[in-house]
Image: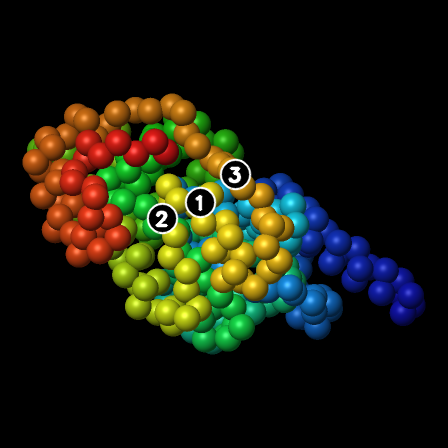
């Protein structure tokens, strides 16, 4: 094969890696290519949304997608196994860092919005000193209600084998603990859901880790219910022209409700929430007094 054909083949691989629907690609071909093959893009800014799932990460991506290079949970199918390997010490910090840097070079994103960024936060902060971070934060009660509805929908409607595997691995990383279901949580156990300890401890762990890791001058904290009211603040924070981001964007709102939490004793639910979440709830959501807080999302 002559040089011209080699160049053409490499370009074809790069094109596949950048444009393919990754849900239908068995092997990430781009992993065999060195970083230098992928041109270094001139970014207008570099930012990561590091909120948990069901806190508005899809909405943040939607706000940026028409004007800037943005993605929501990019390459999650391949990133989740890498995270799993790192968490379980099958790969070391250096290998994981190299994977993240390679992915960053390939994708050349200006906004990377993903709940998975929690697992990368130390690398993202240390390796990309020019990056800024947006933490979308949601009160623990409405977040739990939303994540349980999300889980119930996925339990009923696995889209494919890869999605099922992705969901199971991700859920174990997030919510599995050594705590067992108690009688007050029978509704959770009967529906294949995790314990309140698992859900609430993950809420605390994620938010606390982000707040402790990202330098304050590089972090913007926005409540999920106030994303659209803070568009101008986001633009100022990232140093982009005012008025370039749209207002009133709202994505991934679940209409189907399973009302699982209403079938758990309210005092028991709030006892668990206070045990894990009270400190952060008092600081960021002092107006939320319990489960029956009326959150429209």
Residue 249 — which label?
3
The residue drawn where x is 60% and y is 60% is: 240
Lower position in the chain sequence, tag 2 or tag 1: 2
- Residue that label 2 marks: 223
- Residue that label 1 marks: 229
Cα gap from disc 3 to disc 2, whole angstroms: 15 Å
Quadrant in which residue 104 is drawn: bottom right
The residue drawn where x is 28% and y is 61% is: 208
Cα gap from disc 2 to disc 1, whole angstroms: 10 Å
Element type at mark 2:
strand
| Label 3: few (<14), some (14–19) or many (≥20) C-alpha neighbours in 10 Å | some
Mark 3 vs mark 1: give the one in front.
Answer: 1
Quadrant in which residue 289 is drawn: top left
Tag 3 near tag 2, CB within 8 Å: no
Q: Is residue 53 above or below residue 219?
A: above
Q: Position of residue 293 (x, y in %)?
A: 22, 34
Lower position in the chain sequence, tag 3 or tag 2: 2
Left or right of 265 on screen, residue 200: right
Cα gap from disc 3 to disc 1, whole angstroms: 10 Å
Q: Nearer the viewer, residue 175 or 237?
A: 237
The residue drawn where x is 68% and y is 46% is: 20
């Amino acid at each position: 094969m002559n040089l011209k054909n080699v160049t053409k083949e490499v370009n074809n691989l790069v094109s596949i890696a950048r444009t393919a629907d990754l849900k239908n690609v068995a092997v990430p071909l781009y992993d065999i290519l060195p970083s230098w093959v992928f041109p270094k893009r001139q970014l207008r800014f570099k930012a990561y949304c590091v909120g948990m799932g069901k806190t508005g990460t899809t909405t943040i991506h939607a706000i940026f997608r028409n004007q800037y290079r943005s993605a929501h949970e990019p390459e999650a199918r391949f990133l989740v196994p890498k995270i799993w390997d790192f968490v379980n010490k099958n790969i070391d910090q250096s290998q994981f860092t190299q994977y993240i840097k390679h992915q960053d070079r390939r994708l050349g994103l200006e906004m990377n919005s993903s709940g998975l960024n929690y697992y990368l936060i130390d690398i993202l902060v240390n390796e990309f000193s020019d990056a800024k971070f947006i933490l979308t934060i949601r009160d623990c009660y409405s977040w739990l209600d939303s994540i349980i509805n999300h889980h119930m929908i996925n339990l009923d409607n696995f889209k494919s084998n890869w999605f099922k595997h992705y969901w199971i691995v991700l859920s174990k990383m997030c919510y599995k603990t050594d705590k067992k279901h108690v009688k007050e949580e029978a509704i959770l156990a009967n529906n294949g859901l995790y314990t309140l300890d698992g859900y609430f401890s993950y809420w605390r762990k994620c938010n606390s880790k982000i707040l402790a890791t990202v330098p304050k001058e590089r972090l913007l904290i926005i409540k999920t219910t106030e994303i659209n009211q803070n568009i101008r603040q986001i633009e100022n924070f990232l140093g982009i022209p005012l008025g370039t981001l749209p207002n009133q964007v709202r994505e991934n709102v679940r209409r189907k409700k399973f009302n699982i939490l209403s079938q758990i004793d309210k005092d028991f639910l709030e006892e668990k929430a206070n045990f894990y979440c009270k400190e952060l709830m008092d600081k960021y959501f002092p107006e939320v007094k319990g489960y029956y807080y009326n959150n429209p999302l």
